[in-house]
Image (cartoon, rainbow, N blue to C red):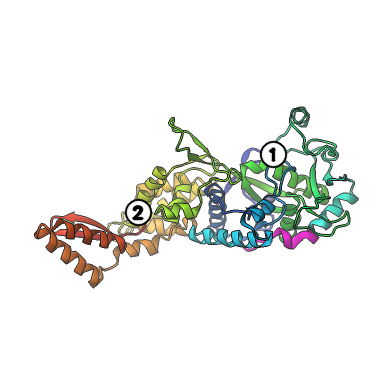
Amino acid sequence: MTMTLYDTMTRSKREFIPIDSPLVKIYCCGLTVYNYAHIGNLRTYVFEDLLRRTLLFNGYKVHHVQNVTDVGHMTTDADAGDDKMQLAAEREKKSPWEIALFYEQAAISDFKALNIQIPEDMPRATDHVVEMIELIQKLEKKGFTYVTSEGVYFDTSKYPEYGKLARLNLSEQRQGAREEVIADETKKNPSDFVLWFLNKPTHIMKWESPWGPGYPGWHIECSAMSMKYLGESFDIHCGGIDHIPVHHTNEIAQSECATGHTFTNYWLHGEFLLTKIESDHDGGFGKESKSKGEFNTLKSLKDKGFDPLAYRYLCMQAHYRSELKFSTDILEAATTGLRKVYSLKRENDPLAHDNEAFQAAKTRVLDAINDDLALPLAVGYLNSYGSLSLWKEFDPILGLDIAERSNKAKEAIPAEVQSLIDLRNQARKDKDWTASDSLRNQLIEIGYEVGDGPQGTTVKKRTI
Ligand SMILES: [Zn+2]
């Protein structure tokens, strides 16, 4: 079995070869826990979960680490600005620690609802300040840092490969930076970034350090925690594409300058989710963003009556490296599609009695998934085969609870439901439409789809 993955560093699909097979070490940039995760964040975590599950399906073992950013994440990609944790604490009149814990738990319940497997380690930044300080000291000893009144900086001019992931042109960037307001005038180069903030008297979360009391910059946590849990070089690093030019670029600079060798062998990045802008009559779509304040969460979808697994299914309908368009109509269509999968019947399974055909179909679907996670193609094949047993075979990757939900569709009708059906049939015979409608609503309320057939009321247990 060969698996290929698109590596952002080389801008090419490469055969996946782990450093220490069968173990695969993955680091994914995680949550900034100052608010609920928006569905664009969740799209990235679903993609990372599909990657993890595919590796497991292929027989690898996985050590998956995803950090929890509970300190120091700035309001913009630049290193200037207010701390989002602190702003949330002020908004909700809680301590930053309470905010972090609350939203971390909310995210974990989103993961569970979406069948996202919980990573082996979810280290919190605030528990790893010692490791971050040690890493900064290592960089300082090697001459990659300088200290100003604002903080300890990484000097990007000391690292000729700086910007290799994003293929940044630093002289162009310097040009561009002159036109912007650089909030911090103590920096030597526009691309230099903070490792440790100093002299921030109003900041609540603070720690002692060799440079004075302060708190870590945004990027250092991922270098410190990934290397602590996975070693100085590991297999795969994932995140959203917005991390390429700043966050991942800076992670590489810190890590490779500290250790002297390659940080990560494969860089995988998920594209954005674009949400339909209701006020735009031309049908425009825009990016979900927490910092703008208004965004879709899993809870808001559930409140509108959607099943989290319909959202998971929707995420498989665009390749992870393509934009995914989102609107309630699009999610409704995904729900209908998934309902069809759940209502497939074993009796009508075209592949159930032909092992050769089943194996050939299985190979075709798996080859698609192993080709840089081409889930839209794989799901297209699965839909065209219409085989419940084949869907079930791939559910360890898909995570759609196929066996459980399709059994639910076949559950016998309980006696109390049957008596509502009988009452409704009688009401319709009596042309008592008010009673008939109210009984219909009662059936819907307790989880049934209701129809009218030649023999009277028909019901089906709702699967989604
Ligand atoms: Zn990160």
Q: Position of residue 322 (x, y in %)?
A: 53, 39
Task: Tell whether 441 sits left or right of 289.
Answer: left
In the picture as drawn, the residue positioned furthest to the left comes out as 430
- Residue 342, picture quadrant: bottom left
Q: Position of residue 455 (x, y in %)?
A: 13, 59
Element at label 2 = helix
Residue under label 1, please give it.
245
**Quadrant location of the C terminus?**
bottom left
Q: Is residue 408 visible?
A: yes
**Three-letter residue code for mark 2:** Arg
Q: Which residues are magenta?
A: 119-131
Task: Tell whether 333 sits left or right of 180.
Answer: left
**Three-letter residue code for mark 1:** Pro
| Residue at the spot 42% in from the left edge and 61% down from the top edge | 401
- Residue 80, picture quadrant: top right
Task: Tell whether 429 sits left or right of 338.
Answer: left
Q: Position of residue 252 (x, y in %)?
A: 75, 46
